[in-house]
Amino acid sequence: MPHQAYQIDKMISAKQIAARIEELARDIRARFSDTDKLVVVGLLRGSFVFIADLVRELDLPVEVDFLEVSSYGNSTESSREVRIFKDLRGEVEGRDVLVVEDIVDTGHTLTHVMNLLNARRPARIETIALLDKPSRREVPFKATWTGFEIPDEFVVGYGIDYAQRNRNLPYIGKVRFTEE
């Protein structure tokens, strides 16, 4: 399937992202200062760059695990059907957990993930999202921490893709579809 032509306009620079991650890490360290080990759960694939940078800023004992979930496929619109492709390797029962998401859009994915993980009885569970689009919310969900609130734009970069492209951009860019 051919891709629609598009351009990418920079929205959030790599420098802005790095500065915000430092601030978020301070808040997370304060919240979990009493933990013996924080289980940091990244939601693949979009969060992999964010989680890597975030855990390097956390001066806490951490264990990193991943869930692979999707509600997009190769589309620019959420299907609202959350599918789990890879579950956690480790246990979270009785442990402190931080769920790391790239972007909160409709809220369906994080609501589904939080229901799944809460059923496993963690001691504490919090969420962090790099980006939040509150104007798109269909289910009431608010992450504990948010990097940046953005308007209803389709974005790529810093781990976030469009049809598996542009994850490697060091910044967040707005996709602008063009006529060929």
Image: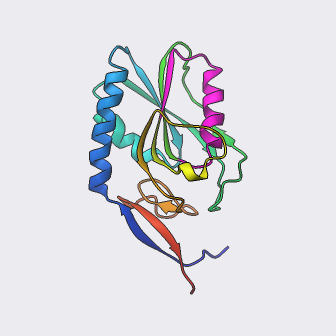
Indicate the position of residue 109 as horizontal and vertical percent values: 63, 41
Query: Looking at the image, which residue is at 60% across and 16% down?
Result: 121
Which quadrant of the rendered structure holds the N terminus?
A: bottom right
The answer to whether 114 appears left or right of 83 in the picture is left
Indicate the position of residue 135 as horizontal and vertical percent values: 57, 52
Measured along the vertical axis of the image, is residue 56 above or below residue 30? Answer: below
- Of 40 and 132, nearer the camera is 132
Res 61 seen here? no
Res 26 seen here? yes
Measured along the vertical axis of the image, is residue 10 above or below residue 29? Answer: below
- Of 79 and 64, nearer the camera is 79
Q: How is the image coloured?
A: rainbow
Indicate the position of residue 145 as horizontal and vertical percent values: 43, 36
The answer to whether 51 appears left or right of 177 in the picture is left
Which quadrant of the rendered structure holds the C terminus?
A: bottom right
Indicate the position of residue 131 as horizontal and vertical percent values: 46, 49
Q: Residue furthest bottom?
A: 180
| 151 in the magenta segment | no
Residue 72 falls in image quadrant: bottom right
Measured along the vertical axis of the image, is residue 110 above or below residue 61? Answer: below
Segment tinted magenta in the rendering:
104-127
